[in-house]
Structure formats: structure tokens, C-alpha cells
Amino acid sequence: MFAEHLPILQIVVPLVSAPVCVLLRRREWSWGFALLISWFCFGMSALLLQRVLQTGTVIYYVGNWAPPWGIEYRIDAVNAFVVFLGALIGSVVLLYAPRSVAAELPGVRANLFYTSLLLCMTGLMGMAITGDVFNLFVFLEISALSSYAMIALGRDRRALTASYNYLLMGTVGATFYVIGVGLLYMVTGTLNMVDLAIRLEPVLMTRTVLAAFAFLTVGISLKLALFPLHLWLPNAYAHAPSVVTAFIAATATKVAIYVFLRFFYGIFGTHYTFEVLHLDMVLVPLGLTGVIVASLVAVYQTNIKRMLAYSSVAQVGYMMIGVGLVSVTGLTATLVHMFNHALMKGALFLAMGCIVLRVGACELEDLRGIGKRMPITMAAFVAGGLSLIGIPLTVGFISKWYLVLAALQRGWWPVAVLILLGSLIAVVYIWRVVEVAYFHEPTGKTAEATEAPLSMLVPTWMLVGATLYFGMSSTFTSGVARRGAEVLMAGLAP
Amino acid sequence: MTPQTAILVSLSLPLATCILVALAGSRPNVRDTISFIAGLLTFSSVLSLLPYVQSGVYPGISLFEVLPGVSLAFEVEPLGMLFGLVASGLWIVTGLYGVGYMRGHHEVDQTRFFFFFAFAITAALGVAFAGNLLTLFIFYEVLTLSTYPLVTHARTPEALRGGRIYLGILVGTSVAFLLLAVMWTYHATGTLDFTAGGILSGKVDTPELYILLGLFAFGTGKAALMPFHRWLPAAMVAPTPVSALLHAVAVVKAGVFTVLKVLVYIFGIDLLRDTGASLWLMYVAGFTVLAASLVAMTKDNLKARLAYSTISQLAYIVLGAALATPMAVIGGGMHILMHAFGKITLFFCAGAINVALHKTEISDMRGIGRQMPFTMCAFVIGALSVIGVPPMGGSWSKWNLALGAVDAGQLVFVGVLMVSSLLNIAYLMPIPIRAFFSKPAPVTDAGHGNHDGDHHASDHHDGMHEAPVLMVGALLFTALGCVVLFFYAGSVYRLLEPIVR
């Protein structure tokens, strides 16, 4: 009974818990409840992933209505992996949250905050799990609206403009998405993904479908922050509360990339997307430009959260290069990097949250000598940074390995070289922080800083530990990613 | 103890030492005793592998799969055996020397120093025992990162600058070139295992072989092939024990070891000879040999001169590998050992002079032979070994390299080796000559200007004034080693012979 309804419970449980969470007025209660739910979701997502890996695609009809009329949840290795990732990050971040939230958002009612976080998590998991393009839009809005609210909570007033910017861009993205879906519905009369894939085949060359293709490309690319559509991202990440930044940075763009993959590999199919319309000739150059330009911009940032945000834009570039290489290895690189980047960026932003708690800022100049005052936190930062660079024995290396290998397989030498060049720029921006943190005596704000509380260090180090573990033994992550890549290459149409 | 266990023990002992050193940080005597005992144990564990390797059985162990089909795996073959013995053996000596130096020099943060020192040894042994290219690459990077805190130990702006160059060049070349070469190899052959005779034959076309070789040779920044040699002089801001063990032995030898290993076990020397792909590398190495020697002559700072001398000597080994004849490769391999003993002696002497007399510039070292007779005698022996004069170990490796050049029909490189030996004489011998035969400089030299209130200053020129006994003992030991190796070169030759068969 439970196992059978796992796909829908994955979404319904957090969705229903959100309003319940509002009723829990005490800070500790609402947090404890949200934490419980998130771990429950994590457990379910692990079960779901295990089932998909054992038995293949899991199909669930919501309300027992058969597709294409009803909503179908269709879980294969790709989205099971993404749901797992979202639930994993959500549960770790919630474990970390109470001290940070209490310190950074003193005037905010905790129950509302945790409700938003649960909703955001629901929305992201829903986007990943559903097999219906309109249902996906609904979840996209749920996650987007809750993240606008959470970003606006940042104690800096610039958080408001950042959130407003994100709202505008996000709405444009979502609108483009829904226009694209509408156009597809016009020609096919269906919203089910598999059904769409089948019915689109004969009408692919019509102008309506071409227009839908264009709208969807731009709309989803906005959501996933593909260079140069990333302008909303740096400010949103920099000014949001630490917990929110960590959660959104680790999950939101990844889920959007999943949607991209689902549409262009699944629904439109590789032949149409890459051989007829040559989307790869757009994705790879943009991805590469994103890697180089965003990394260079990151070098010049003085706010470390902003620096990490630009680094995220660069990392999205890596993922999109993998998408544009159109091969099982390339997609493996993308999927494995989605997971790996979530781990390391999560760890880095959580470490920054610890520093914000103790120092009250994350400007580079405020961190002089922080390595002496907060050695455990900074060690986590360095480990995450090394992973970002792609040093072996960290997950970053695994991602880069697959990506470069995919570029070599396609015979695109310059791409391989530029990917590695991007890692070298990462050395520069990470090392700026290392030098300030370790080569200066603690002065000013860091003078009386102390190590972060255990309740925050443990979740941070959980992610760091995962970064190292999956960097040493990538059998699980790359195995799942490979399965997912094969599924994607096959497309949705039977 | 099975050889597999011995491999793991050798790798994990230094790592365990790190932790113990950190725990015993507040009690320096306990801490330094732990380091010493761990050094002895590690060395004996490495040594226990020697009989297996000599009998032609190469023990190996595979730990876990990092990437599909590529594991973190170790295999001890003759070249790795030799490098492992050198690194772990000289660690003990340097450990003792380091205790004397760090205390004599009143360095701060000694616990951090010994922590990363032990960590670097793990990495060096990992490089030595690596069973495939990925494992080698992993430990190569770990070695870079673990030595960074040692290079920047002083935390001064100079140290920071030195550290930037160090990290920039080593990480830069390894990620941009070496990693690309490793991936290319994997892409072309589907394996990364070190295999006798190489794995590239028939898998990569000849023009591409040139590029791949270039990526490997320049990607191994630690081999300090020009123009990627600048990190080595920059790393001289480190305390002298670091320069001695890491930048004369472990780190740089990890670089040339990688080059040798790749040329022998990935390319295969037959392939290189047949295609002539390594011809250009001979010229680059030959150029580095001569150019670095010439630069060394212009340096007045003793450590800087030794650094350029190291760059030149490393290029010998690369040259040996590029010549790709059995004799040259064995000569290159032997030079790892011979140069290690010679150069570590010279660095030990430089550190001893610095601690005892606070002199770093060669021009200030007139007449110091009377104050530090033991140190300067050891300096002569080390210098002669580096030059390659019998009866010092260094003469054999040069001999084999020259023979190898003749075998390859590249007589010009015999000439390069000879000219280089003359240049070695020109930049190394004036130092002891000045120390023994010149009159001491007037007391008002600037050598100890920044060590005010130093109690040595008053009795500066009266009679003997040697460095702490641990330091002198260490440098006499390695000097003795230079002589002993002359007589045991045969067994080293026999150990290395199988790699080119």
C-alpha cells in the first residue's frame, strides 16, 4: 500500500505538511516538524530511487485517472535521482537551519519560514517527479513563489531588489514556458509528456512547434541561469538568508536543468533538437562562455556569497556543455555534476552561513585570519573549494573527468582545454579566500569570532563528507547518472 | 607481513603520524620522537618490499574503484621501489635534521610543520607505488597541496608570493596539461594501468604522440622542465628542511619519476625510439640542463643557486627518459637516488650555515670553513657527487646517462653532459674554496642583521661554531651516503634492470 503510493506521497506529504507547519507557533516545534517531514521525504526518495534502479521506470496515475487525461507520475533513473537530490539537500539544510535562521531572521516568524521552505522543496520535487507538462508548471510556480518570499527575507535591504529581480526574470521564464506548452497543446491536444513525444513526431516541422521550441528554450534557460540569462542569480544568492541560499543554490538550477533535459531529450527527441535544429551549437558555446566569463567575474567579487554565486553560473555552464555534447558520457557528466555540484556548493554555502553567524558578514576583507578562529568551518570551505577546482578525490574531479572525456569522444579538443582552463580560474578565486583566511592575523570583526556551533558544523561536514566519499568512490553516483543518461538518450517516445 | 599489507602500512603510517603529531602538539619532545619512530617504521616497511621486487614479483593491491574500470591501485615495481626507498629513508634523516633546524632557528608553528611534512611523505609514497596513471595523478596533486603550507610556512608576504607561484605553476600545469594527457590516454586506450612495454603503441598516431608527450612532459610541472621551472626557486622561501627533502628529493623526484614512469610504462621506450617522438624532448631537456646551470652561476643566494642546480639535474633524468635507450633510462633512474643524496647534503649544509652563522648569501661565506669544518667537508662531498666525480655515487648515474646517449646515437648530448659537469664545478666549487681558503669577512657583515640580540654574534669568528649536533649528524650521514653509493651502484643497477627488459 505504502510502497505502491510512494510517488504521490513524496509530494503530498510535504505539501500537506506545509499548512500544518503554519499552525505550529513555537519556533522549535515548527522546525522539528519540518525537519521530520524532510527526513521522511528523504527516506521515501531513497526508497523510490532504489525501486527505480531495481525494476526500471515506475509509473503512477494520480487519482487513478489514466493518461493522457489524468496526470501521470513517471519516475525513471533521471528524475528519481533529482528527487533524491532535492530531498537530501532539503533534509541536511533543515538540520542546519535553526541557529542560522534565529540569528539572521530575528523578526521573522519561524513557522512561516519553515512552511516556505517545505513548499519550495515540494515544488522542486514535484517538478522533477511529474510526467505532465502543465502540472510541472504548477510546481514550478509553487517553488518559485516560495523562493521569492524566502529570498526577500534577507536582512540586507538589497534582498528586496534581488528578490524583485528574480521575480521578474522568473516570471518571464515561467511565462515563456507556459506559452511554449500552450503552443504544443494547440498542435497536439495533450499535456502528457510521453503522449506529447509521440504526437509531436509528425508535426515537428510546423511553425507552431518551432515557436514552442524557441519559447521553451529561452524560458527554461532563464530558470536554469544559462549564461547570459543568469542575471537574476548572483544578487538573489548573495542577499538571501544563508539557509535559503544553500538550499536554492544546491537544488533550484538543477531541477531546471532536469526540465531542460526532459523537454529536449525526452519530448522533442535528440534527432530534432540536435540534428535538425542544432541546439548543441548554441549550448556548447554559451556553456563555455559561461564557464570562462562567470569564473573571471567571480575572481573580482569581494562578497564571498556573490563569488560563489558566479561560480554557480560557471558550473551551470559545465552542465550545459555536457547537455550539448549529446552522448551518454556527456549526459552522465551533466547528471553526475548536478548531484556533485549540489553537494559541494551546499557545503560551501553552509560554511559561509557559519561564518555569517559568527562574523556577521561575508565580505572578503572581514574574513582576515578567520582560519585561526574558525578552523573547522574553514576546513570545510577549503574542502568544498578544492572540489570546485576539481582536485582528485573530490566529487568535482569525477564531474570534470566525464565532461572532458565526453568532449574528447566527440573530438572537440578546444572544448576539453577550455573546461580545464575553467578549473584553473577556480583556483584563483578560491585561493583569494584561502590567503585572506589563513595569511592574516584576525582583526576587526574576526578578532573575537569563535567556532560555529556543532548543530551547524555537523550538517556542513555531512555534505563535505559526501563530497569526499563520492569523490573517492563514484560507483553509485556515476552508475545512476549513466543509467539516467541512457534513458535520456533513448527519448520518451516508444 | 604480506607485501600487500606492507604497501598499505607504508602509506598509512605517515598519515597516522600526522594525527599523532597534531595530538602531541603541545609536547615537542614527544611529538618529534613520534615523527622519528614513524619514519623508522615506514622505512622498514618499505624496505620489506625490496626482496619481492628484486626477485621479480611486483606486489600490488587495488583499493576501490574511483571511476569505472580505474581503481585506486598500487603496484611496486623497481622504479617505484627505488623512489619509495629514497623518500622514506631520507625522511628519517630530514626528520632529525628538521628538529635541530626548527628549534635552532626558533621557528613558530612547528606542529603544523611536522604535520604537513608527514602528510607530504604519504603523498610521495603514493606517487612511488601508484599502479596506474590516475592513482599517480591523485597523489601528485595531494603532494602539491600538502607541501603548500610548508612552502608558505613563514606567512610573510614573500612566502605568500612564493606560494602563489608554487601553486599556480604546479596546479596549473597539472590540470591544464597532465590531466588532459591522462584523459587522452584513457580515451585512446581505455586503460590507465602501467604496463611493461607501454600501452599507447598502435593506439595513437605519430604526430599526436608528439603532442601527447608534450602534455605529459610539461604537465609534470614538478619535473621543472623549462619554461615551467619558476616554482622551484620560488619554493625556496620554505624552511630549509622542506627545501632539502621536498624540493631536492620528494617533490621534484616525484616529477621526474612521473616522467620516467610515463615514458617507460605508458609510451614504452621501443615506441619512442621507433617513432622518434621524444627527440624534441631531448633538446628541451638538454637546453634546461645548460641554461639552468648558467643561471645558477649568477645566483648569490646559496639556496637559489642550489635550486637552479636542481632544475639542471632534474633535466638529466628527463633527458635519460627521452633518450629511451635501456642504459639511459637506468641512468636516469639511478640519478634519482644519486642526486637525492648529493643535493640533500648540500641543502642540509645551507641550512646549517643559516642556523649557525645566519648567512644565506654566498658572498658572505668567506672563511666559514674554519668555523664549520664538518659542514663544509660534507658540502665538498655533496658537491663532488652532484658534479659526478668518483668516488661519489653521482659519477655512476652520469656515466650511464652518457653511455645511453651514445647508444641512442645522440653524441651531442654526451657533449651536453660534459659541459654541464664543467658548469657544475664552476658554480659549486667556489663555495667551499671560498670557505676554506679566503680570509673571513670583517665582523660588520650584514649576514645576521635581522637576528638582533643573538647570542652567537659575539663569538662569531673565534674557533669552531657548528650547527646543532642533530643537523651536523644528518648532513654527515648523507655525505657518507654519497660515498657508499659509489660502491653499491651495482645493486641499484641490477634493481632497475628489469624495467627496460
Image: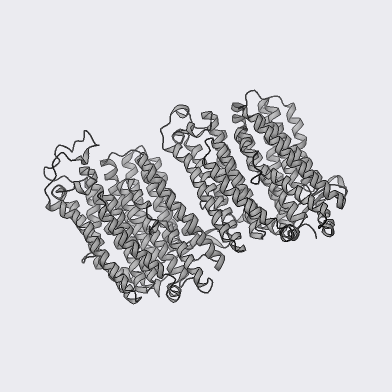
Q: Please tell me in which quadrant of the rendered image residue B21 appears.
A: top left
Viewer can see residue B6: no
Who is closer to the viewer here, A325 or A379? A325
Who is closer to the viewer here, B214 or A142? B214
Above or below: residue A427 compared with residue B87: above
Report the residue that reaches farthest toward the top: A107
Q: Please tell me in which quadrant of the rendered image residue A459 appears.
A: top right
Q: Residue at x 55, y 45 (%)?
A: A295
State the image coordinates of residue A162 (x, y, percent, origin top left).
65, 33
Viewer can see residue A182: yes
The answer to whether residue A352 is left or right of residue B159 is right
The answer to whether residue A449 is left or right of residue A26 is left
State the image coordinates of residue B154 (x, y, percent, origin top left).
35, 40
State the image coordinates of residue B258 (x, y, percent, origin top left).
42, 62
| Image quadrant where one finds the C terminus of chain B | bottom left
Q: Residue at x 51, y 68 (%)?
A: B208
Q: Residue at x 44, y 65 (%)?
A: B262
Report the residue that reaches farthest toward the front: A207
State the image coordinates of residue A61 (x, y, percent, origin top left).
84, 48
Q: Residue at x 59, y 30 (%)?
A: A100
The answer to whether residue A394 is left or right of residue A136 is left
Who is closer to the viewer here, B219 or A461? B219
The answer to whether residue A100 is left or right of residue A386 is right
In this rendering, the count of numbered labels is 0
